[in-house]
Image (cartoon, rainbow, N blue to C red):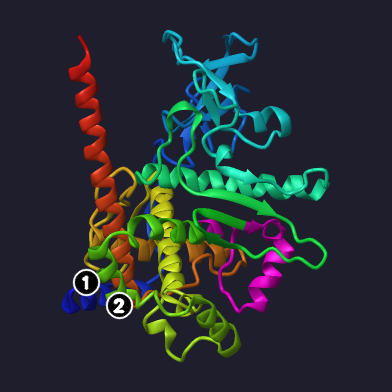
Amino acid sequence: MVRPAQAGRTMKRQARVRARLPLLFGLKETQRMNTFHCQNCGHPIFFENVRCLKCSSDLAFLPDRMTMSAIEPADRADDGAPLWRPKPRPQKRPSAARYRLCHNNAAYQACNFAVPGDDPNPLCVSCRQTHTLPDLSQPDNIQRWYRIESAKRRLFYTLAKMGLLDATPPNGERDGPIFEFLADQPGQQVITGHAQGLITLNVAEADDAERVKRRIEMHEPYRTLLGHLRHEAGHFYWDHLIGPLPDRLERFRELFGDERQDYTQALQAHYSGGQPPGWQDDYVSAYATAHPWEDWAETWAHYLHMVDLLETAASYNTRLTVPGTDSDVEDVINPLEAGAPDFDALVDQWVPVTLLVNSLNRSLGQEDAYPFALSVAALRKLRFVHDVICEKKKEQDAEDAQQAQDAKAAKP
């Protein structure tokens, strides 16, 4: 938890940084999320790409390696299905690894994840999380589904990097939340939400015009597909990381409030009466005021925004400083590669990076990409999310190390 003096210093740093624009930054080549490189020609490739624009190599994301890769045809499986392998770097021997393309790639060109050759599931680890699809005989639904799955793959990547789900579940199984993507029917509106491990998303949210319309109607400064999925994933992980653990639940209630208050009544009160005055002093968003569960989910989503943006900035080797301060130029931390990064260090860099993003947007005549200002109380809640995730990652790393040690000991 943030100590009062520490929180005060953080807020002073935020105010000082926000008062001075622009940022100075530099870029160098590297390979991280959003800026992978084709190992065949070295050209930059991105998370959604299926073909290198320079050498025309086929591309796929390899979940067991957590990287984008150029791939080439190899041999065939016993059932005759084509297999692929990572394309060897120049002067290197071909890899023995074999992969299949996800079924949703072959059938709909809707996925760029590969499936290990010995995995019996025809779907990749991301697509197999989707339990229900909209009616794909409706042409608009195919494009909506594609956009949602693209956002979900980004969520999958971040959760896997944070150790919150298994990127290589055994025996064709799936890990993490389950999803259903549904369309409104006459007299039956689909409500986006989470219940008992199942995340439901109205596919209308994939239409830009409809999403903007709902954002304006609900007085929201920020509404995206990826934001929806991150928010609902927060509900899923509350059930796994907070609810069953008395000590964490007590800490949660100290910060977010008592989740045992009636949820339905709380939402009705929120939508009929609006948010309380001065909500910005305690919450990351207006919707977070509705109920402690929504406060947690909004804060969780905000934390995922934070780590994903910082990882992207780090992938470009962004270096930053703020003119007029005595701080040195420093590299942006990649929070998904830094083990258990210090929360204060992340916040110190988060503020100037978001100022850079907003300034670039304004230069193009666009609205701020990050229309938020974090209060002391909001930072305390974000720190709690950070600590919970780091604790989980530490537990998972210890479990993985023990399994590896047991496997090694079991060998003759």
What percent of the width, then of the height, locates residue 1?
A: 21, 69
Label 2: state its secondary structure. Answer: helix
Q: How far separated are the C-alphas under marks 2 and 1?
A: 8 Å
Q: Which residue is mark 2?
A: 376
Disc 2 or 1, which lies upstream in sequence? 1
Q: Nearer the viewer, residue 321 or 105?
A: 105
What percent of the width, then of the height, locates residue 224?
A: 59, 61
Question: In the rendered image, is residue 316 in sight?
Answer: no
Highlighted magenta segment, given as a residue range: 201-229
Q: Residue at x 54, y 53 (%)?
A: 198
What percent of the width, then of the height, locates residue 218?
A: 63, 77
Q: Residue at x 67, y 37 (%)?
A: 110
Residue 179 part of the magenta segment: no
Residue 215 part of the magenta segment: yes
Q: Quadrant of residue 301?
A: bottom left
User: Does the magenta stretch mainly form a helix, a strand or a loop?
Assistant: helix
Q: Residue at x 21, y 71 (%)?
A: 2
Q: Which mark is residue 2?
A: 1
Q: Amino acid at mark 2?
A: Val
In the depicted structure, whether residue 263 falls above or below residue 108: below
Q: Amino acid at mark 1?
A: Val
Q: Nearer the viewer, residue 241 or 167?
A: 241
In the depicted structure, whether residue 280 falls above or below residue 353: below
| Label 2 with label 1: CB-CB less than 8 Å | yes
Label 1: state its secondary structure. Answer: loop
Question: In the rendered image, is residue 103 in sight?
Answer: yes
